[in-house]
Image (tube, rainbow, N blue to C red):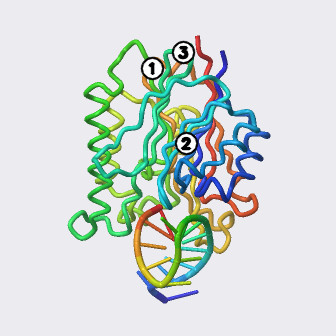
Amino acid sequence: MKLRLATWNINSVRLRIGLVERFVKTFQPDVLCLQEIKCVDELFPYDAVKALGYPHIQVKGQAGYHGVATLSRLPLEPKGTENFCGSGEARHIAVALGGQRVIIHNLYIPAGGDIPDPQLNPKFGQKLAYIRTLTEWFADGGAADTSCQHVMVGDFNVAPLEHDVWSHKQLLKVVSHTPVEVEHLTRLKASANWVDVMRKYVPEDQKLYTWWSYRARDWRASNKGRRLDHIWTTPGLEGAARSVTVVEEARGWEQPSDHVPVIAEFELN
DNA sequence: ATGGTCGACTTTCGA
């Protein structure tokens, strides 16, 4: 079966439910992982999402901040939400695809504040600690069940490669592209031999972005983007990947999120 | 020119 899996930091699902509708009607994902829904579970627009053809919904919400939701046309088995680092923040949901030995992790890694120094900025320390905890969790069993393959998608808030940012040199001291964050993400990637599916389809020497700041006067003209959103799989699924699409046009939709959707297609046995 | 713009339990904080 073909699986079209999408991830999108929506930056308020209630404000942008109309953009979710536009996206799913045009791009027809089977599973859509949203981050930064910015509402408690009770305020999630379940009825609107069901009406779009996604009756299987897992939500981990939080008042005002963060929050993730996984929407599906296909039956899902909830696999729980991990409270990595004990912060109590809503940043992770795992689901299993019904009838498939595939687990999908929807993640929103902390942004980390403005100053890239854990001493001066506790949020940066929290970000690094969160990635370390994830790394240990996957290495210790989170993805160790070899009877299942895993997909990890979401807003990782790190642009690891030189061409994941508009200027490697100018962003070396900017949170999201500092060497210490890249080292942390590299160790996370090694925790289950994760495959960076987006970069299977777009060579590492080509620029690739999923986020453009709201602060630019003209995001398209300045094009100072970063690849903060990712789709990773365990090695058993690498051969199942068929395509990756970054829906850059969504950044130009009316009242957009600052992130755009990323879609990966898989052919599952 | 160290700015700029978003969204939320909005006059502040996180991104």
Q: Earlier in the sequence, mark 2 or mark 1?
A: 2
Whether the residues at callouts 3 and 1 have beta carbons within 8 Å, the answer is no
The residue where tag 1 is placed is: A149
Q: Earlier in the sequence, mark 3 or mark 1?
A: 3
Q: Quadrant of residue A137?
A: top left
The chain letter under disc 3 is A
x and y, in percent, of residue A206 in the image:
56, 46
- Residue positioned 76% across, 62% down in the render: A254
Q: Secondary structure at mark 3?
A: loop
Disc 1 residue type? Gln
x and y, in percent, of residue A172 in the image:
37, 62
The chain letter under disc 1 is A
Q: Secondary structure at mark 1?
A: strand
Whether the residues at callouts 3 and 2 have beta carbons within 8 Å, the answer is no
The residue where tag 3 is placed is: A100
The residue where tag 2 is placed is: A69
Q: Quadrant of residue A55?
A: top right
Labels 3, 2: front one: 2
Disc 3 residue type? Gln
Whether residue A35 is situated above or below residue A153 in the rendered picture: below
Whether residue A203 is situated above or below residue B2 in the rendered picture: above
x and y, in percent, of residue A258 in the image:
60, 59
- Estimate the spatial distance between the alpha carbons at disc 2 and disc 1, rounded to whole Å: 20 Å
- Estimate the spatial distance between the alpha carbons at disc 3 and disc 1, rounded to whole Å: 9 Å
A139 vs A224, left or right, is left
